[in-house]
């Protein structure tokens, strides 16, 4: 909502005088990444019952939650609730949000822009910043700057009115929110039954892709792993630190500890770096995300993992739909708390949304809930590598994603590469938690699919 309209609404509520109303992709930016948190402390036992039936409460708290991608985000308040807030304060928050823009200022993006539409936009004062072919997703991505005097949201309305047959949206910014061993690093794989596959078991299968921060492929934890990296961050923007992406990559194809096996041993990993630093925070544009998806599909990925969350975006949705025709997609369900908004891309129906649980089957207290949640996996105090290569524990739905991505790679082997059937194997074999059947906290339940090979 434009600031002027918000001010008029406040004046109205205060009883003061009111005034009456007077084949190409185009992107408009607005998105925040998944607020995953480094968590160096283990959950303490607070007396909750152990075991799969102990699902009434959230995970032990408060965890020592740190920042998001690269540790740049603020800590969650103790207990995860933020404390009691007055109705007036909540009302003003609903009007103005948290004070952070969730899209690139003065830009929009779109898909399906024909030459005539392009000319109409230019005549209206738009400038074409870039036109990027999406060779694997059958189209092209256009990034436009808003006409002088219009903000991004106003420009979006103008573009949609001038060229109604083209999909436009803001350029949203998104937040990045060991198998078979006996050590602490392997509890997650043991919990969900991802038994050890021999070294190289996934070498001949299709590559697995992740859309995340950059990955430090030279870290000792990824020694010997097949990791192909590509950056899609604008040249004028500094890439975000690689901590988050490196931790996710290590879970999938690296070794957290000498006795730990990766979740997808021998698989080729395609790592698309899409996060850049904006005002000190690691954020990914919708435009860079869709370019990363296009690259991953073109390189043969048949499972794509998204460890971040943000707003719904019509242009990104087009890319998701096209990618889902060739690959299984899995994403973090979000860390917005039980009353948080649906997180995207997880909430798109083509994507498997993963919620985080702790080792005692309890939901992560800051996990987002909703009808779109499809499966639960370990995401509280998951052990991976940190800055400098040492072990570190992480908490957030981002860190539940690698378990489901690896399971999908194995499920595809049992279904001959049939993506819907592989998805059905995962949900059909889940260990039901919470209310009988699918629910808004655990989806179909805890991931419980082992598989004996990859595809």
Image (cartoon, grey):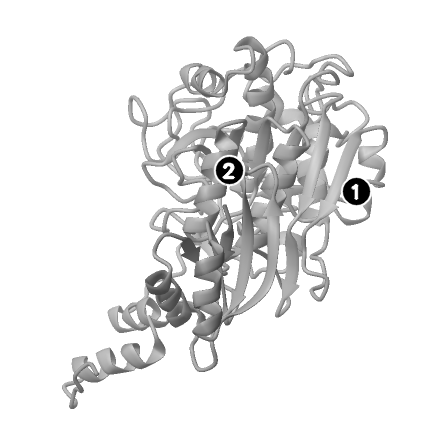
Q: Which residue ends up furthest to the front in the rendered image? A: 116
In the rendered view of the protein, which quadrant contains the C terminus?
top right
> Looking at the image, which residue is at 55% across and 38% down?
137
| Picture coordinates of residue 38, whole percent (x, y) | 63, 48
N-term mark: 2 or 1: 2
Q: Residue at x 43, y 36 (%)?
A: 363
Contact between marks 2 and 1 (CB within 8 A): the answer is no
> What percent of the width, then of the height, locates residue 94?
32, 67
> Which quarter of the picture shows residue 451?
top right
Q: Looking at the image, is 269 positioned above or below residue 175?
A: above
Q: Position of residue 283 (x, y in %)?
A: 59, 58
State the residue position of label 1. 390
Q: Is residue 6 left or right of residue 200?
A: left
**Side of 36 relative to 159 (left or right):** right
Q: Residues within 10 Å of mark 2 (few under 14, many from 20)?
A: many
Q: Which element carries disc 1, helix, strand or loop?
A: loop
Look at mark 2 in the image and give the residue it sits on: 331
The answer to whether one can see residue 70 in this image is yes
């Amino acid at each position: 909502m434009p600031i002027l309209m918000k001010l008029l609404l406040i004046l109205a509520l205060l009883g003061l005088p009111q005034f009456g109303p007077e084949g190409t992709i185009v992107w408009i930016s607005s998105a925040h990444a998944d607020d995953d948190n480094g968590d160096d402390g283990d959950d303490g036992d607070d007396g909750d019952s152990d075991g799969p039936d102990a699902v009434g409460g959230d995970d032990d708290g408060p965890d020592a939650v740190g920042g998001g991608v690269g540790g740049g985000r603020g800590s969650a308040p103790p207990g995860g609730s933020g404390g009691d807030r007055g109705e007036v304060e909540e009302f003003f928050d609903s009007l103005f949000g948290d004070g952070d823009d969730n899209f690139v200022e003065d830009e929009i993006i779109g898909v399906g822009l024909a030459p005539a539409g392009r000319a109409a936009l230019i005549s209206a004062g738009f400038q074409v910043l870039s036109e990027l072919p999406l060779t694997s997703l059958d189209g092209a991505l256009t990034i436009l700057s808003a006409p002088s005097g219009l903000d991004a949201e106003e420009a979006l309305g103008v573009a949609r009115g001038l060229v109604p047959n083209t999909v436009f949206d803001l350029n949203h910014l998104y937040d990045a929110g060991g198998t078979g061993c006996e050590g602490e690093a392997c509890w997650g794989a043991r919990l969900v039954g991802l038994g050890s596959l021999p070294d190289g078991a996934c070498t001949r299968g299709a590559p697995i892709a992740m859309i995340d921060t950059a990955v430090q492929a030279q870290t000792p934890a990824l020694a010997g792993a097949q990791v192909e990296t590509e950056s899609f961050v604008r040249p004028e923007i500094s890439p975000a630190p690689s901590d988050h992406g490196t931790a996710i990559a290590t879970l999938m194809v690296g070794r957290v500890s000498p006795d730990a096996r990766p979740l997808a041993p021998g698989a080729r990993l395609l790592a698309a770096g899409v996060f850049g630093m904006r005002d000190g925070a690691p954020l990914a544009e919708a435009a860079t995300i869709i370019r990363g998806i296009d690259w991953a599909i073109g390189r043969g990925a048949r499972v794509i993992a998204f460890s971040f969350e943000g707003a719904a975006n019509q242009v990104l949705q087009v890319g998701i739909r096209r990618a889902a025709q060739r690959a299984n997609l899995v994403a973090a369900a979000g860390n917005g708390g039980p009353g948080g908004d649906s997180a995207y891309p997880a909430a798109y129906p083509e994507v498997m949304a993963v919620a985080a649980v702790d080792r005692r089957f309890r939901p992560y207290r800051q996990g987002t809930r909703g009808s779109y949640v499809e499966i639960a996996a370990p995401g509280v105090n998951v052990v991976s590598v940190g800055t400098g290569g040492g072990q570190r524990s992480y908490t957030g739905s981002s860190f539940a994603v690698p378990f489901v991505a690896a399971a999908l790679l194995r499920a595809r082997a049992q279904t001959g590469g049939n993506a819907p059937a592989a998805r059905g194997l995962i949900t059909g074999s889940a260990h039901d938690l919470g209310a009988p059947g699918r629910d808004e906290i655990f989806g179909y339940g805890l991931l419980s699919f082992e598989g004996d090979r990859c595809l």
